[in-house]
Amino acid sequence: MRKKLIAGNWKMNNDVAESLILAERLKVLSEEFDERVDVLVCPPFTSLYAVNDALRTSGIKVGAQNMYFQDNGAYTGEISPKMLKSMGIKYVIIGHSERRQYFNETDEDVNKKLKAALKYSIIPILCIGETLKEREEKKEKQVIKNQVIRALENIKSSDVDKIIVAYEPIWAIGTGINATSMQANEMAIYCRSCISEIYSSSLADKLTILYGGSVKAGNAKEILSQSDIDGALVGGASLKAEEFFKIINFAK
Ligand code: PGA
């Protein structure tokens, strides 16, 4: 049985004070969380230390939204996996479409970042997803397959089982238009079949696959009840504690 995971991606929102207010509210709500669901929040770097500290005694896990693949060096403005590890951070989002789109992150960067995270035993959440144009041209499966193959190049199977995949169609992110639960499940199944092809069916079965893109309290139940969707990567709706809590409650 794959355990469900609800992850909140706060993106570039919340200064330190605002982050702590949200973290404290989530901490209170977490007393009622179901143990069958893992809960993760990914604040911006500037709030990471404070939020991690505030949630230390709660069951809520804390992750980063990005990292560089080198351990240290002359890379102004970057944060390394070694630095995250030293803070006790155990999760990192890798290859989010906003990083690919606005910061020119390539599949090769994503592959290097995955390897670097794994080296430090940080669980990477690998984001994949097609654009609206690619879906209209019916190329979504090919796009996903290429992203998976390139991201996982030279990563051995004993490491792949530590990776979480988030299928996030770009046309659904922050737009209010979510993929239908059928579309999301179909792509999760397809993604699992790619892993089965590259590695093995037992590894594919074990893989945690999240859906992301306009998940909110109103559509979470339907999306999270699909056979191959093991949780959600939630952007906008993770900024409101009560709404995020409702989504978590649908993930049983
Ligand atoms: P959204 O973002 O829920 O605001 O669409 C999801 C994501 O980017 O991970």
Image: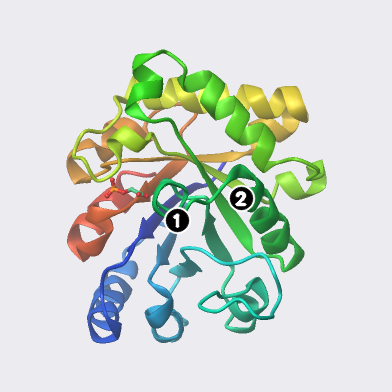
Residue behind mark 2: 110
Q: Position of residue 191 (x, y in %)?
A: 57, 27
Which residue does the image show at 81% across and 47% down from the upper left? 158
Label 1 Cα neighbours within 10 Å, binned few <14 / some 14-19 / many ≥20: few
Residue behind mark 1: 103
- Quadrant location, the C terminus: top left
Q: Nearer the viewer, residue 59 or 214?
A: 214
Which residue does the image show at 35% across and 61% down from the upper left? 33
Give the residue type at disc 1. Phe
In whole angstroms, how far apart are the C-alphas of marks 2 and 1? 12 Å
Q: Position of residue 104 (x, y in %)?
A: 49, 51
Reading the chain from its start, which is encountered first: label 2 or label 1? Answer: 1
Give the SS element for disc 1. Answer: loop
Instruction: Tell me if 118 is positioned left or right of 249 in this view.
Output: right
Which residue does the image show at 30% across and 42% down from the upper left? 173
Which of the numbered marks, if any, corresponds to residue 62?
none
Q: Looking at the image, how many numbered discs can be counted on the residues?
A: 2
Q: Position of residue 165 (x, y in %)?
A: 55, 42
